[in-house]
């Protein structure tokens, strides 16, 4: 699976609300790479599954519904958006309470992961990427030489979510994301770990940029 594209993909993984999205977006801007937030792809799938009226706890129903849903990833201003049947989903769609509650349940379904991992690998053809998520360095691009894992304490992560106006159960999502059978959240082999609990955004960005060739 190794090819020239994988050498240009910076992978950033970590738990919910560790600050990895903000860091990844700025690192991508400074490196002239395209920023890909894979959490938004799982959120878009969850949003579409919920539209069908299905209970996200019902894995078989999720599997069937997901088979008919396609997520497109058009690039706008240096970052991928998520779009379904030509409708670009908004931050309100992607970060609603029902999506926050359901996304880890949808993301544990292996057929959903297989589809989205294939979509994520296909994005490598766009050129240099900064891709962030839970399994990017471990599963999507394990051959990338540029892997990071951004962590932060549970208190800091919960307060970041509150400051963003979200009433998200960060600890419960992490428990589900770390214990699921398919591609659980792990520190990828070879990843540089950055503890973002006490860093400013600029310090965290520098911590990544300083380690890049
Ligand atoms: O990054 P985020 O918090 O927006 O991600 C939302 C959920 O999507 C997260 O709780 C687990 C899932 N996810 C995943 O399973 N794999 C990824 N690569 C990215 C996100």
Image: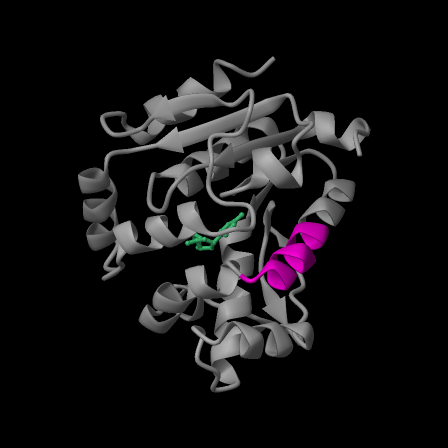
Left-right relation of 113 to 91: right
Depth check: 59 or 174 in front? 59
Occupied quadrant, residue 28: top right
Depth check: 79 or 184 in front? 184
Image quarter where the N terminus lies is top right
Measured as percent of width and height from the top left, residue 187 is found at 47, 30
Is 32 magenta? The answer is: no
Can residue 68 be seen from the camera position used here?
Answer: yes
Main SS of residues in magenta: helix
Left-right relation of 172 to 94: left
Depth check: 18 or 59 in front? 59
Residue at image x 68%, y 70%?
70
Which residue sits furthest bottom?
53
Image quarter where the C terminus lies is top right
Taking 194 as reference, is 66 above or below it? Answer: below
Is 115 magenta? The answer is: yes
Measured as percent of width and height from the top left, residue 103 is found at 44, 63
Can residue 89 be seen from the camera position used here?
Answer: no
Measured as percent of width and height from the top left, residue 8 is found at 69, 28
Q: How is the image coloured?
A: one colour
What span is in magenta? 109-119
Residue at image x 20%, y 51%?
163
Residue at image x 67%, y 49%?
120
Measured as percent of width and height from the top left, residue 161 is found at 25, 51
Residue at image x 58%, y 62%?
82
Taking 177 as reference, is 33 above or below it? Answer: above
Left-right relation of 148 to 139: left
């Amino acid at each position: 699976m190794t090819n020239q594209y994988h050498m240009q993909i910076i992978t950033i993984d970590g738990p919910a609300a560790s600050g990895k999205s903000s860091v990844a977006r700025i690192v991508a801007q400074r490196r002239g790479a395209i920023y890909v937030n894979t959490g938004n792809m799982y959120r878009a799938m969850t949003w579409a599954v919920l539209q069908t009226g299905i209970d996200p706890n019902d894995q078989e129903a999720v599997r069937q519904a997901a088979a008919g849903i396609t997520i497109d990833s058009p690039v706008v201003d240096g970052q991928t958006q998520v779009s379904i049947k030509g409708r670009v989903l908004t931050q309100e769609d992607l970060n609603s309470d029902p999506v926050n509650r359901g996304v880890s349940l949808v993301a544990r379904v292996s057929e959903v992961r297989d589809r989205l991992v294939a979509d994520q690998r296909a994005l490598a053809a766009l050129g240099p990427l900064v891709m962030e998520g839970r399994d990017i360095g471990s599963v999507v691009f394990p051959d990338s030489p540029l892997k990071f894992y951004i962590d932060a304490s549970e208190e800091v992560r919960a307060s970041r979510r509150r400051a963003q106006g979200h009433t998200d159960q960060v600890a419960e999502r992490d428990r589900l994301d770390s214990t699921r059978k398919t591609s659980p959240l792990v520190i990828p082999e070879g990843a540089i770990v950055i503890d973002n609990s006490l860093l400013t955004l600029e310090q965290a960005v520098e911590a990544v940029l300083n380690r890049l060739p």
